[in-house]
Image (cartoon, coloured by chain):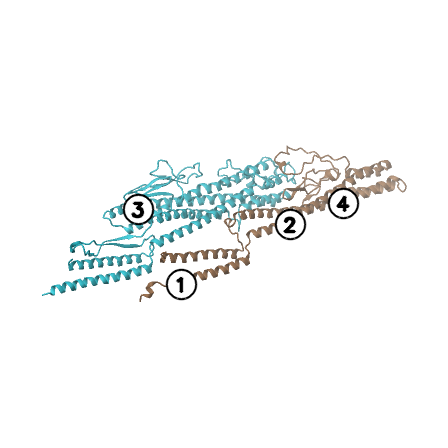
Chain colours: A brown, B cyan
Amino acid sequence: MRVTEHTNFDLVRENVRKSKERMEGLQRQNATLKKLNAPSDDPIGAAKILEIRTDRVNNEQFLNNARLAETFLSNTDHALSELSDLVVRAKEIAIGQSSGASANDDTRKGLAEEVKQLFLQAVSTGNRRIGERYLFGGYRVHEPPIDQDGVFRGDGGKMMVEVSNGVYLPMNVTGPEVLGVTVQERPREGDENSQVNRTPAGHTGSEESSGTNIFDELQRLRISLLTGDVDSVRGTLEGLDEVHGKLIAARAMVGSRIQGIQTATNSLERQNLTQANLSSSLEDADMAQVVADLAKEETVFRSSLASSQKLIQPTLLEFLR
Amino acid sequence: MGVNNVMQTGRSGLLAAKSGIATSGHNIANANTEGFNRQRVQVNAEATESKNGPKAMIGRGVRDVRVNRVNDEYVEKQIREGNRNLAFTEERDVSLRQVEDIFNEMSGEGLNRVMTKFFNEFRKLSNDPDNEAIRQSVREASQAMVTDFHRIRKEVDEVRKHIDSRITGYVREMNALGEELKELNLKIKISSIGGASPNDLLDRRDIVMKELASFVDLQAHKDNEGSYVVEIKGGGPFVSGTVSSKLHAETSPADEFGKVDGSLDIRSESSNSPTVTQSISGGKLGALIETRDKTLSAISGRMDEIAFNLAHAVNEIHSQGFNRYGQQGVAYFKAPEQIDRAAEVLELSDAVRENINFIATAAQPDAPGDNRIALAITGLQGLKLMNDGKSTLDDFYNSIVADVGVATDRNRSAMNQNKDIVMQLGKMREQISGVSIDEETTNLLQFQHTFDASAKVIQIADEMLKTILDLR
């Protein structure tokens, strides 16, 4: 085989080029701490990373949603517990005043005043809000849902939140659901259409209550006490029981929703952790490996330079002096 | 045989040695010349005149001093092909790297991020539909997304323009090379008439052929006069002996092969068809055309699809919602009418751009807490809107990124392979035609010795003549 100067020099050039190219690649990993710097480094991994990034940003939002819903729901729970205490007190009064032993018109008049206070308290609890939003107003979040006569001004709208991918929970309970109030009809243009129903958004407040509502029952009790009609005082007991039962059921529902949110949150956090691991294994460089490879590559480079020196140096001319 | 003849024999030896030394000198001088083939002096022994009777056939030195180049045509041909493949992959690598940069979100913003942000701003809005500040940031995120669609379209178009300017340059270079090849064919024909081998012209012609072959797939053979006949595959005859044709790059409307309106078409003077853009292949031109009309057109088409489907899906929901003025039917995007160039023309609707109160969140009027429309819009993120209901917007976009990565990666490994092949062929060529300084030095010494010895022959002949003249 003929070996010419070109062959020699090309060999040297090529070795140096390849070695430097490899070193540059390692150097880049070293500087960026990433082994995936462009999609072509690992096309499938790159697409996967984008997917994971989207998921992580979404999950972050879902966690925020869940926190918001949890706050809203635990405030709702407090309000419901206050209302149920209030109803219990009303029941005590009704039972006490309907037996007749220690009750007379005077006690009933005095207690009627207390029931009025209970009524006002119920209205104010029904108008509880966090931030700018009323808890029981449905979609009409900006106006007090209960007016001074105990008439419901809100609607039955459920505000859904997405607590994890595709999982929607209502973060509010509605007046008709828990207070037994009826939605006042307002003129409305056509809603409800196919597009909107693609996601499980809440339904509109056309829901009818079963007739008893906390405000009406309290008013009834007060009037019965004022008029001194023992039978009608006794008659309010059934309604109050019904109202109380509704409140208890509502608290159970709120409690289970909070639990559902916590489960979703836990699983989101776990998911975030596994995905962080996955994306790290896809894009982060193994630094120990990079440094070791770099050292190895440097040795290769040096020895290729050393052998090049031997290859290039002597020609016949040096011996012809 | 006369003494004079001996002197002539010596003289022919001197001449041959001198040619040898000159040729070695030429070789050494061109040791680094690209495409140079080492040259060798070839001589024949001068036939004897048998005047002295059949028993003593005495030689008369050398004759026919010829200088030939050492060259293997088959290796040359392989190098041309190897070079064409290498040029193809190298040219494609340049453009693909530019495309990859457009979609490189590994360290920075990109459509994937802004699209995620768009949906999550709507999620925030669904938590608090009446919030002014969130409405503001929903609009900003939407504008950022629209801008990124424009950016990608624009950058893809820029790569396309860059490719067109390279096509113009390459066509010009090819025409110049065709012209030169034609002239070289003629010069070589004339020089060869006397039987001499015009080595350095032949070398130059090989280089021209090699360069020409790097642009496009060619078919080449030599006619019976030794002139090259070159035909562009799918593009008609280019150079035929001493006649050459030309290529032209001209702008033209879009075609059905993916060429967009206003980018360049290639026309061949010698071809009957009005354009040869899609029929030629290989080499730098082939790479540019493939990247421009296949890769880039597919990418911008897919971006258009995303923009089109997203805009229409969002509008379909949004226009059913009620905004803060209790109005229904306001579009969110100024939706493109057709898929073609959708990513380029996508804009926010004038209403939404001018007034955030036009963003609709409610499915019923007079319900500031109603978030159903906003929720339905966020639901689009997980909906399979693309690819006939098989992929989500995200999946579809991510697959573009993956495809660009795969194309770049695959082309790069092909390029490295081609580099190795060309390297190997170059080594083969060097083994045959390359200049070795050691070898040439040895040759120099050898010819120098021959020169000395031939001079000695003349000297001796001279002395013999003297001796004879001195006989009295």
According to the image, label 1 marks what residue?
A310
Same-subunit check for callouts 1 and 4: yes
Point out residue A197 in the picture as x, y percentages from the top left corner. Answer: 63, 36
Residue at 55% x, 56% y is A286
In this rendering, the answer to whether B431 lies above or below B459 is above
Residue at 30% x, 61% y is B442
Q: How far apart are the two marked residues, 1 and 3, measured between alpha carbons?
A: 42 Å
According to the image, label 4 marks what residue?
A81
Residue A130 in view (yes/no): no
Question: Quarter of the image holding residue B143?
Answer: top right
According to the image, label 2 marks what residue?
A270
- Tag nearer the camera, 1 or 3: 1
Label 1–label 4 contact, CB within 8 A: no
Q: How many labels does the image show?
A: 4
- Looking at the rendered structure, the secondary structure element under dot 1 is helix
Residue at 18% x, 63% y is B460
From the viewer's side, name the closer residue of A151 and A200. Answer: A200
**Apparent side of residue A219 relative to residue B419 in the rendered image (left or right):** right
Question: Quarter of the image holding residue B370?
Answer: top right
